[in-house]
Image (cartoon, rainbow, N blue to C red):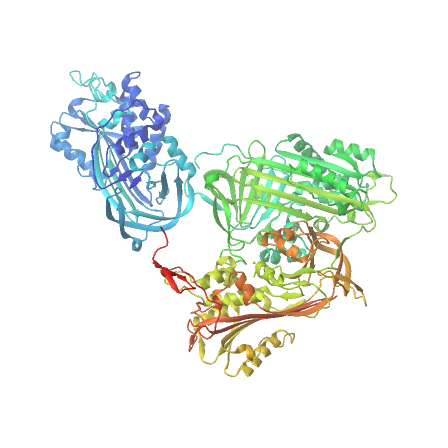
Amino acid sequence: MLLISIGTVHTFRRHHHRQQSSFVSRNDFDWRLAREVFQHETSNVVFSPFSIKLLLTLLYEAAEPGTATQTQLEVALCDPDLNRTRAFYAQFLNASEQTNGDYEFDIGTKMFLDKAHGKLPQAYTDLLEATYRTTIDRVSFNGTKVATDRINSWCEKVTRGRITELVTEDMIQDAELILANVLFLKASWKNSFPDDQTHNRTFHVTDGETVTAEFMNQMDLYDYTDHEELGAEVLRLPYKGRQFSMNMLLPHRNVSLAALTNSLTPTMLDSIAQKFVREEVTVVIPKFRFNYGTLLNEAIQSLGISDIFTQSAALPLLSPTNEQAPNSTSKNKIQVSKMLQKAGIEINEKGTLAFAATEIQLVNKFGYDGEPIVFEANRPFLFYILDEETNALLAATPRKFLQTRFSVDYQPFEGPWNDDFDWGVIKVLVRSGNRRWYGRFNRCHFVHFQEVLHKAPSNAVISPLSVKALLALLYEGSASPSETERELLQALSGGNDQTVSKLQTDLLQYKQMQQDLLITDRVFHDVSVTIMQKYHSIIVARYNASTQAVDFQDTVTAAAQINEWIAYNTRGNIQNIIKPDTLHDALMLLINTIYFKGSWSIPFPTNATVERPFYTGKRSTASRFGPRNVPYMKQRERIFYYKHSDELGAQFLRLPYDKNQLSMVVVLPDEQVSLGQLLTRLTPQSVHQALADMAEEEVEIELPRFSITYSSSMRECLQQLGISRVFTDQAELPLISRGRTTPLKVSTILQKSCILVDEQGTEASAATEGTLVFTILNQPIKFIANRPFLFLIYDEAKGNWLFAGKVEDPLRKNDFDLKFIKEIFKNHNSNVVLSPFSVKILLTLIYEASDTSFGNAVSNTKRELASVIQNENIELTRSYYKQLLESAQQDNKDFDLNIATNFFVDDFIEVINKYQQIANTHYHAMLEKVSYSNPTQAAATINNWVSQHTNGRLREIVTPDSLEGAVITLVNVIYFKGLWTYPFPEVVNNVKPFFGSNGKQSVAQYMEQNGQFYYDNSADLGAQILRLPYRGDKLAMYFILPNQDSSINQVLDRINSGSLHQALWYMEENEVNVTIPKFKYDFSEQLNEPLQQIGIREIFSQNASLPLLARGRGARDEVRVSRIFQKAGITINEVGSEAYAATEIQLVNKFGGDGVQIFNANRPFIFFIEDETLGSMLFAGKIENPVF
């Protein structure tokens, strides 16, 4: 059964006795009336309460004030304030007269007055014409034929011939006047249904009765909700022009239409609008066409409006004036005899045709004209939290990964602007921060940021205000005049000390807010250091900052005290920013914390949040992993401040917070603009202009819900912005402390920030820490790899692990994902090096050859191989490999990287042309014919090709014996030779102990150096992680060194995709003493069993389905993989690394050997139970359907 808000669809009719209900309030008049009509009609119904309300409003205007007639009619008013009711109808009827190319809509209201009746009061007729667009037509009801024809002709004209007989001669006999309202609507669906998708389907009239009907079908985005409380699915079908829409309510299968009708209340209908979510919906609805007519007297009376149908009706303004009809017998005796409605509707693929007499089908929604702006943040965007009163940027980030009007006025900040430093910090950090996939900052040059940002998206959140607060504390401690003071003042204010004063004022005001925004500053100093009284007085008075003495000699206790203070002032969001190891040489820590928690002025409905794709690159350009599904918060048709900047190619949206002057401004690049391009264009001036130009607009918002935790060394960023002297031995900071003869300098400035944005609002925190030390070198972190460790060689631009390995003994010569790596590592107690990438690309080529086995069912072969596909999307995978391989082919003076793939195909086999084109176009795979009947020659051909592409490092990947039965051999080679960005000094005979996993000790040649490297001691992994970059800013090697109390296998057990990514995320740039052994070894492994252990099995069996690969004798869907084999090697020394791998996949005729068998009982089967000792069959049977 199906219910529509404009009618019901059934196929049979039954009558019930109508019960009169009690008086009803005006708020639910429409739906109480609809329920009265619906529940007493079991046939199809189409009718409009609006039209009836309009006519009843005309009667209300004619009623005598204070009478029961007027009181009863009052419930039909659109608003209890009569003036607002009049304004509504005037506006609606005026809008209906406007021409619209998207639909036809006509509405007419007439009063047909008998000529003998006399004139009505002029004030009343003027009101009808001016406000209700109602004209008066005088006819003679004595000449019923002429009057009938006149009324019906008018009705036929308005409805375009659809209603030709509204009244009959019998109906108008004895009439004094007739109030009639007629409408016509012809509207096209905003998303029309394809004609070719219309098919006959079954319509379930009742549980036991069905009919066949024509059903339309299409899939598109619609407003939809499955309303559990109502017991129905609700769908909104908009018409072109957005003035009309059809809402369809489909009862759940266990809910009757009568029960649904009884559940309809205004409150319930309001909840539908609130629960609507824009979803991709497959809509299957029947076409229908019917007419409907009904006498409404009883329905109107059941709602408490009864006086108008009796002789007690008090409708004096419908009576003639005394002067006009002194002898009239009708004065004050006018009453309603009939209220009749006729209507019809037709629903088809193109839209709706609806017509009615005495009713209008759908109401108009008024607001902003035209389509709403769509703000769909499904690609990288910027946001910042702005104090609109003081213009302070509280937080900023690159994010890569309406029925009521908002009434709070927005006054953009008019200046003077002093945010050059803020935008400088943002642009430098997000540019350099995007050099690496995991969002950490490395040694990248400013000029490279565009390419880097495009290739390596990451999330970050920073607080420029927190950095500025810390720099202001340093400024107060600098000598005057001095170069240190000049640099700090220039960065903070462009050299204007008045701006520093404004910053002080702003910070003091913030610190008075306490609840939503909490900013604190504290100087932690060693007990041996005395803070100058003048400095203490300044920071207390101007910044409301405090000081605290701690014992930095007890590093553990000191770190705990400081971290406790930070956690308290950031509501527990930032913890353990200070590590004991960092305090060994510290004399003083200047720390600023900022915490903000704000609720949106207009919260996002939680039930509207849905998962949608998020595009990390342009939609037309496939990213490495394709679009990722993320939860999107939604706001529909609300009023927000918005601006599209043509200059920047971006949208600016203001999301205000409740109860304060803060707001989040989201900056979304246009689809054709990358985040890197937007960052290039951003200037403080262009942002100021965009904010000043923001205006109220109706906006549909789709914004990802997100959470970011981020930490960064600010030192390099601040140096790029001109603050360098404070980090050197020449730093001039004499006003901070006394008691030490050695002057102070800043060793590090670190910020850790986090933000949570959800439907309710935003929670953001940041802590910035500056460490002051003596102007001598402090002790670096030590990274001494003198025990077994893991390493990864990572393509940071593409997100690939090109090589992964572990070192058990440096002198021994010997997700494609972590599961594969771990499966190999756990079975070897010797050195391992392998290339997951090389295996993945070949398995992807095998995936391309697989196909569905039965009809549209996905074959097991394809299903198992899908794990190697990026996001299980083959188009994105193809684009990913094509982009990567093209990049590898480009000459690079800093490193050598060669990736090559070849098919060695038997002479009698023909590779299918389409497959060959796919392999060549997307995977750069070439084809070469060989004769496997001469295995010696075939092996020589393959091995020569491998040797050539690995610079002679791998000379043999196959032997003549290993090619027995082969018809196709796929080979991939990868070769890399790179120089360290920071080479190790060569030291002759630097021999030290190496402690093996088995407890044995050996000696190895070590390399050592001190330098700034990305490093983390991961408690989750129980290991230290070190990044050694190669020249060219493309590749890096990662070392994972288990802690002293952990073994390499224990670390492997803790590693998963999430934990490893998290550990890489937390890496920070530190001064590190690196000690690692030199090593060189080769490794080879047959990979059949490891791959089967992680779920790739069927390609090795006779069930393998690879029909798209080749044709020819023994080839067409008759091949399987016989073996997958890889040889690899690596050399690590002071100048850099050389690594190489070759992977071979051999295909044979699948009926020519054993292979792994698969018994998959997914179809009918026979079974028996046998006594194997006696050979007796105890039970036998068959299974046709295992479900019972």
Across and down, in percent, residue 228 comes to: 39, 38
Left or right, 556 with respect to 106, comes to right
Residue at (23%, 29%) from the top-left corner? 296
Give the quarter of the figure containing the N terminus.
top left
Q: In this view, does 433 lie above or below 965?
A: above
User: x, y percentage for residue 193?
Assistant: 32, 50
Spot occupied by residue 10 in the image (x, y as percentages of width and height): 24, 41
Relative to residue 1102, is residue 997 drawn left or right?
right
Residue farthest to the front, as pictured? 1174
* Badge count: 0
- Residue 412 place in picture, x, y as percent: 57, 37
**Is 860 rendered above or below residue 1063?**
below
- State the residue at coordinates (78%, 62%): 993
Whether residue 120 can be seen here? no
Q: Can residue 302 be seen in this view?
A: yes
Residue 555: which quarter of the image?
Answer: top right
Side of 865 relative to 783 (left or right)? left
Determine the image quadrant of residue 1108.
Answer: bottom left
Residue nearest the observer in this picture, 65 or 553 = 553
Q: Residue at x 39, y 31 (%)?
A: 267
Which one is in front, 36 or 393? 36
